[in-house]
Image: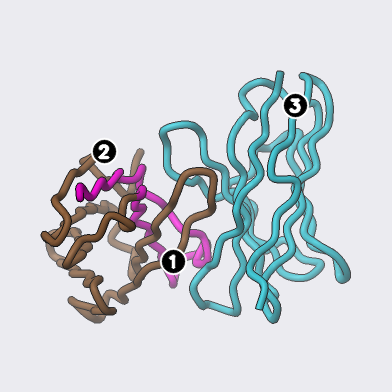
Chain colours: A cyan, B brown
């Protein structure tokens, strides 16, 4: 039973480029969450999605960031026109209904 | 405004002894609490949770205590093992709020278990 998968594990982008982070939830999980961890800080909630629906995006920056969880395929976190401050570890988690959230290994984004 | 606080950035404990990690929260809407362990370059791993209707939950070497009146919870690991060395995050959820699914994390405590 595979856990939450994230790819790529490491992503390097130059300022102004786009970053696409992918997350495949655990088998049987239909709820996906994205969190961001800045250096020396805890994880901060960004967005919660179910299939084809954004349920709670209260933690998402208003500009440049978007997320989707299509009917088929992984969830995607997209960051347009990246800036140095976007450098962080981005973690995806999945759950069944209100159950415990299980995390993936993360994508470490570095913006040069 | 940090709603979940872990005031000790680090803790060192001798192998075989008890490790006690502390967490305080300010939001009285929080009613479900979790502890995660995180190794470098990996994602957080779920350890144990507790609902606000309980004051204690135990799973093997791990016990979580909740003191609602003090808005304080703690994770006890006994006996501590070198493999327990990791960053421990406390997280909380407000199940009846509009953001019921989001977890609010503390900043973590680095536990080092010395052989």
Q: Mark 1, mark 3: which one is toward the viewer? A: 1
Identified at 40% across, 51% down, the residue is B105
Is residue B59 visible to the viewer in this orientation of the structure?
Answer: yes
The percent coordinates of residue B61 (x first, y second) are 23, 73
Q: Nearer the viewer, residue B68 or A38?
A: A38
**Screen quadrant of the C terminus of chain A:** top right
Using the image, determine if residue A93 lies above or below residue A27. Answer: above
Label 3 residue SS: loop
A103 displayed left or right of B65: right
Q: Mark 3, mark 2: which one is toward the viewer? A: 2
Question: Which residue matches tag 3?
Answer: A82
C-alpha span from label 1 to label 3: 31 Å
Q: Residue B9 carries which label?
A: 2
Do the residues at pointers 3 and 2 share their chain?
Answer: no
**Screen quadrant of the N terminus of chain A:** bottom right
Using the image, determine if residue A103 lies above or below residue A59. Answer: below
Range shown magenta: B86-115
- The reply to whether the magenta stretch includes residue B78 is no
Identified at 83% across, 32% down, the residue is A18
Which sits earlier in the primary sequence, circle 2 or circle 1? 2
Count of picture labels: 3
Q: Residue furthest front?
A: B115
Label 2 residue SS: loop
Question: Which residue matches tag 1?
Answer: B46
Disc 3 sits on a residue from what chain? Answer: A
């Amino acid at each position: 039973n595979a856990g939450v998968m994230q790819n790529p594990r490491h992503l390097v982008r130059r300022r102004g480029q786009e970053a696409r982070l992918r997350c495949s939830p655990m088998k049987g999980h239909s709820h996906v969450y994205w969190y961001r961890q800045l250096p020396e800080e805890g994880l901060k909630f960004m967005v919660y999605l179910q299939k084809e629906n954004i349920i709670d995006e209260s933690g998402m920056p208003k500009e440049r960031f978007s997320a989707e969880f299509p009917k088929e395929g992984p969830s995607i976190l997209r960051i347009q026109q990246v800036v140095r401050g976007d450098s962080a570890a981005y973690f995806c988690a999945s759950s069944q209904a209100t159950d415990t959230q299980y995390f993936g290994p993360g994508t470490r984004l570095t913006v040069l | 405004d940090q709603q979940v606080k872990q005031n000790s950035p680090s803790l060192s404990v001798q192998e075989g002894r008890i490790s006690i990690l502390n967490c305080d929260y300010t939001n009285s809407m929080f009613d479900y609490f979790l502890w995660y362990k995180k190794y470098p370059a990996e994602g957080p791993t779920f350890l144990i949770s507790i609902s606000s209707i309980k004051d204690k939950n135990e799973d093997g070497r791990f016990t979580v205590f909740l003191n609602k009146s003090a808005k304080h919870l703690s994770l006890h690991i006994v006996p501590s093992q070198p493999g327990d060395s990791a960053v421990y995050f406390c997280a909380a959820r407000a199940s009846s709020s509009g953001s019921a699914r989001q977890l609010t994390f503390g900043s973590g405590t680095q536990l080092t278990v010395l052989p």
